[in-house]
Image (spheres, rainbow, N blue to C red):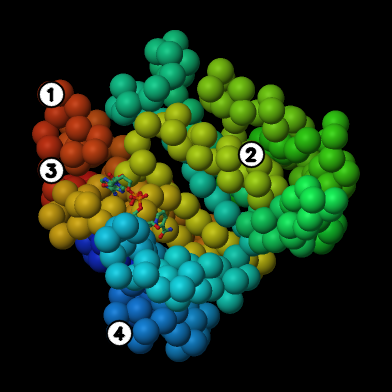
Amino acid sequence: MDLKITCIPGDGIGPEIVAEAKKVLDVVAEKYGHDMQYTDILMGGASIDVHGVPLTEEAVETAKSADAVLMGSIGGDTTTSPWYKLPPNLRPEAGLLGIRKALNLFANLRPAVLYEELAGACPLKEEISAAGFDMMIMRELTGGLYFGERKTVEENGVRKAIDTLTYDENEIRRIAIKGFDIARKRRKKVTSVDKANVLDSSRLWRSVVEEVAADYTDVTLEHMLVDNCAMQLVKDPAQFDVILTENMFGDILSDEASMVTGSIGMLASASLNDTKFGLYEPSHGSAPDIAGKDIANPIATILSASMMLRYSFDLDREADAIDAAVKQVLQDGFRTGDIMFEGCEQVGCKRMGDLIVERIK
Ligand code: NAD
């Protein structure tokens, strides 16, 4: 397969972790007979320094012309970096919001996996963590409360703030289809999370999800109220496969699920549009405190590259090879500083990349 990938190294540890992900992709390409071509674009602080803006039109056009985008992370130290003296629309994060909008990325995927080897980092009781878990949180990213009309008014001397939560059936249907498609690549179970006992938007959500489910009879659908889901994530996380939910609920639940894994340097993510196109990036930030020291954990970015192969290119065998190599490296006792455990060997960013590459070869 000939694949054109736009890379956004970004800021902080971004360039270091993207370099390791490219190394891993290259060895996969060599082993399985693909041709991967990368074009780098600037975004965030790196783009501000060169172009004065966090994202240029040319950069967006380059991203659009690719088959997928692989990103490191953007942003600097928000208290000391001069980027944060700029108006909000010119700060690094505006680049990320801009590219998500330009590429119409409405579906956000965040896997939360507890590896057996890292169970000690899980803050849950041992009898719960011992079972491990592997879930995918699928969050609607461009609708709902964060995009509704909002205003603050004063009525009879009392300040009043109004936020609106709207979803139309098309917005719900397209994310539900993505959720069921992803479930088909996994354990074939969707938990749709809403607040249908209170909200009209949730009642519509539930009924559209049921309509979509009719086309996926091989996938099990269950509904769960968001408050219950927040509890179940810490009580019995192993029950979940794909959690499908709207923007605000997904924002909160995906952070909860990440915390339960205990290892931020391991968490990948993807944002997809209604074709196979997606932007893949680690869930963590640019970690300016450790940038340039060769100590960042590149695994979240490497697993994001694996998601790119699986979800944008349907290269499941190649993605499985990366996931298995990551697991093997952990089993062999190698750790970066953020996931270091007594008795393991601590390695840097580049060495971790090399160890994963060796296990794919
Ligand atoms: P962060 O995720 O960058 O760092 C939080 C802590 O985790 C730090 O101690 C850091 O050293 C550590 N850490 C993060 N990733 C790591 C890795 N791969 N290996 C080892 N340790 C790792 O969050 P922050 O400090 O709140 O934010 C720093 C910058 O990143 C800010 O400018 C923020 O806006 C930006 N940010 C960007 C994104 C993105 O690009 N999508 C996401 C979140 C934050």
Distance between mark 2 and mark 1 Cα atoms:
35 Å
Q: Quarter of the image for the N terminus: give it.
A: bottom left
Which of pointers 4 and 3 indicates the residue nearer the eye?
4
Q: Is residue 131 visible?
A: yes
Which mark sits nearer the N-terminus, 2 or 1? Answer: 2
Q: Amino acid under label 3? A: Val
Q: Cβ(mark 3) to ligand 1 < 8 Å? A: no
Residue 267 figure quarter: top left
Are the two marked residues, 3 and 2, in contact with CB atoms closer than 8 angstroms?
Answer: no
Query: Between residues 68 and 309, which one lies in front from this camera angle?
Result: 68
- Residue at 51% across, 34% down: 256
Residue behind mark 3: 347
Residue behind mark 2: 243
Which mark sits nearer the N-terminus, 3 or 2? Answer: 2
Are the two marked residues, 2 and 4, in contact with CB atoms closer than 8 angstroms?
Answer: no
Label 1, secondary structure: give it.
loop
Label 2, secondary structure: give it.
strand
Q: Is residue 181 visible?
A: no
Residue behind mark 4: 50
Locate residue 139 relative to residue 55 in the image: left or right.
Answer: right
Tell me if residue 131 comes above or below residue 357 in the rendering. above
- Residue at 50% across, 56% down: 270
Q: Amino acid under label 2? A: Ile
Which mark sits nearer the N-terminus, 2 or 4? Answer: 4
Tell me if residue 198 comes above or below residue 89 in the rendering. above
- Residue at 74% across, 60% down: 151
Tell me if residue 241 comes above or below residue 360 in the rendering. above
Label 4, secondary structure: give it.
helix
